[in-house]
Every structure is written in structure tokens, then in C-alpha cells.
Amino acid sequence: MNMREAVPEDAALIRTIALATISEDDFNRLKAMERAYRQEEIVRAISSSEEAREQYFIVGEFEGNVIGFCHAIDRGDMWEMLRLYLHPDYHRNGYGAAFLNYLQSQKSQPMEVYVENSNDQAVAFLLHQSFTEVNRIQEEVYDRPMELIHLRYVPS
């Protein structure tokens, strides 16, 4: 998989990938994701990461097609991963791990992420990648209460 910085022209593909990860029967999550992944918001996030060198908004390409993306911030002594999505057609092939490895190759340091507790697949993936649970918190996300799991990875 080829990794590169996202550009504003990737926004539509990024939105498609993010929404493809939601099951059709999870109406509430789908509505929240549709709000979170408005095209103009994605373009804004990409543009801000282009301007701020501590932000990384990267896409992964396989055979010329964008198949996933990751947005992380280098906090100086830790990665804060804001989002990591991989199109469902490419799950279980090592591509998700490739994004994590890419960040560690830029700077080896601990990594933290917050994941919805209902996102079983993401939680299982991150635990498999040696993340450990730090705690759980309740947050209002798009006007609805949500339990988030705070996970941390510490490189050995």
C-alpha cells in the first residue's frame, strides 16, 4: 500500500470510505457520521493538516485506489489518532496496521485514541495491535450521549 498526504480532492473518497464502515441498521451512528464527514469538513481538516506540520492526514492507496485514511496529531511526546478508517473490502489484510506503522515510522512514540464502545470491530483491531484500555468516558457527540473507550499503545 502506498501512503501519501491527503489532498482536498480526496475528500469525496474519504467520506465514502467513512460511511461505508457503518452498518445500514445503525441509523444513529450513520446520521452522526454523515454530519461528521461533510465534504467541507473533510476539506477543512485536510487543509489544516497541510498547514500544520504536527498534523498528519494521510490516505492509503492500493492499485491506484484510495482504500483508507488516517488523521493523527503529533503532540510532541504522543500521537493522538483522531480517525482511522479502511474500506470494508480491505479489512483483515494488514492495511490498518500499515497506517499505524506509518505513523510510528515518522516518529516512534506512544499513541492514544478514543473509540466508540459500540464499534466492536475497531476496538478488537486496536487491542490486537497491542493497544490497552486506559479508561472509559461519557461524551456528548452530535447531541447524543456516547461511551468512548480511551486506548493507548506504547512502543516497545
Image: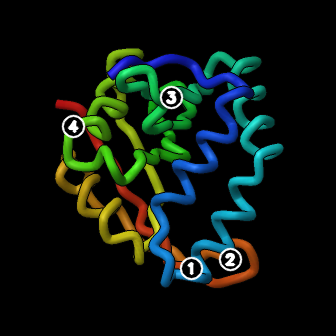
The residue that label 3 is drawn on is 59
With respect to residue 7, does 139 lie above or below? below
Mark sitting earlier along the chain (3/1) = 3
Q: Return the x and y of residue 133 as percentages of the image width and height.
A: 30, 62
Q: Residue at x 51, y 81 (%)?
A: 26
Of the numbered discs in the image, which one, if any, rests on residue 140?
Answer: 2
Instruction: Name the element at disc 4.
Output: loop
Of the numbered discs in the image, which one, if any, rests on residue 94?
Answer: 4
The residue that label 1 is drawn on is 146
With respect to residue 142, does 134 lie above or below? above
Q: Residue at x 36, y 56 (%)?
A: 151
Of the numbered discs in the image, which one, if any, rests on residue 19?
Answer: none
- Mark toward the viewer: 2 or 4: 4
**Residue 53, quarter of picture:** top right
Amino acid, disc 4? Gly
Instruction: Name the element at disc 2.
Output: strand
Q: Residues within 10 Å of mark 3 (few under 14, many from 20)?
A: many
- Mark toward the viewer: 2 or 3: 3
**Residue 6, quarter of picture:** top right
Amino acid, disc 3? Val
Q: Nearer the viewer, residue 106 or 76?
A: 106
Q: Return the x and y of residue 58 as percentages of the image width and height.
A: 53, 27
Amino acid, disc 1? Met
**Labels in figure, total:** 4
Q: In 3D space, how far apart are the residues under numbered discs 4 and 1 (Cα atoms)?
A: 29 Å
| Apparent side of residue 35 relative to residue 145 in the rendered image (left or right) | right
Mark 3–mark 4 CB contact (< 8 Å): no
Mark sitting earlier along the chain (2/4) = 4
Q: Residues within 10 Å of mark 2 (few under 14, many from 20)?
A: few
Instruction: Name the element at disc 1.
Output: strand
Q: Residue at x 36, y 26 (%)?
A: 62
